[in-house]
Image (cartoon, rainbow, N blue to C red):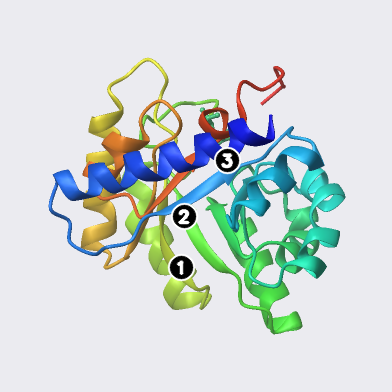
Amino acid sequence: MTTDIAANLAQVKSAIAAAAQDCDRGADPVSLIAVSKTQPGAAIEAALATGHRHFGENRVQEAEQKWPDLKTRYDDLSLHLIGPLQSNKVRLAVALFDVIETVDREKLARALAREMAKTDRHVECLVQVNTGEEQQKAGIWPQQADAFIALCRDDLGLPVIGLMCIPPVSEQAALHFALLREIAQRNDLPHLSMGMSADYAMAVRFGATMVRVGSGIFGARAPMAQ
Ligand SMILES: *Cc1c(COP(=O)(O)O)cnc(C)c1O
């Protein structure tokens, strides 16, 4: 398993580099976020042993079990929250994560701003956009994105660095990547978190600066409730 993870990481990194070169996006770097949700400590250790330091988790409680010890051992970790954040977990999330990718509603934005002011810990934020306008999915709707970004950044002073999306499974991801890029450009936001195991190379061609890859690195996950 250890060798698989090292080999998979190397393979994904070279595919990202190849896609970036293809589309002439210059030296614009792409961060590979290794999505370690449901993965045991041994799998995470295998990735850490290769020197990889960017990870994503989608549940605060699960991350709280897995990461505090590792954070004391590796001071250069970057841990991203990529799943829904409830307001009552904001304190834990601000303490543990380095990037919160799922800011998507006013109540949450206000709670994050209050907690960051109180603790003086300023965690970089991405606004999650529900590009497919799916009822069951988190994220601000595209037509409300500009106003919400302005609220977060200008009124609340959150360190918003970009946008994140999870395209509908049944649609062409490219259309959603293009829409996310357009919203980021008109709001002067430099970062785009988009692309997963099945489509990260395409996301890079559409300007992703962060791709979130789970099964492509760690292998298939046991099924979990979303
Ligand atoms: C699980 C997850 C991923 C990784 O998905 P894979 O298809 O395993 O690469 C990426 N982003 C989010 C938000 C996730 O929940």
How busy is the neighbourhood of tag 2: few (under 14 within 10 Å), some, or many (20 plus)? Answer: many
What is the number of the mark on residue 31?
Answer: none
For mark 2, give the secondary structure. strand
Residue 155 seen in render: yes
How busy is the neighbourhood of tag 3: few (under 14 within 10 Å), some, or many (20 plus)? Answer: many
For this view, does 207 lie left or right of residue 109? Answer: left
Q: Earlier in the sequence, mark 1 or mark 2?
A: 2
Rendered position, 135 above or below 20: above
Q: Earlier in the sequence, mark 2 or mark 3?
A: 3
Label 1 beta carbon less than 8 Å to ligand 1: no
Of residues 160 and 30, the one nearer the viewer is 30
Q: Earlier in the sequence, mark 1 or mark 3?
A: 3
What is the number of the mark on residue 127?
Answer: 2
Residue 138 seen in render: no
Quadrant of the frame with the C terminus:
top right
What x and y, as percent, mark residue 186?
21, 61
Of residues 120 and 213, the one nearer the viewer is 213
Q: Farthest residue toward the front?
A: 3
Whether the residues at callouts 1 and 3 have beta carbons within 8 Å, the answer is no
> Badge 1 is on which residue?
160
Amino acid beneath label 1:
Val
For mark 1, give the secondary structure. strand
Separation (CA) of disc 2 from disc 3: 31 Å
Amino acid beneath label 3:
Ala
Of residues 62 and 20, the one nearer the viewer is 20
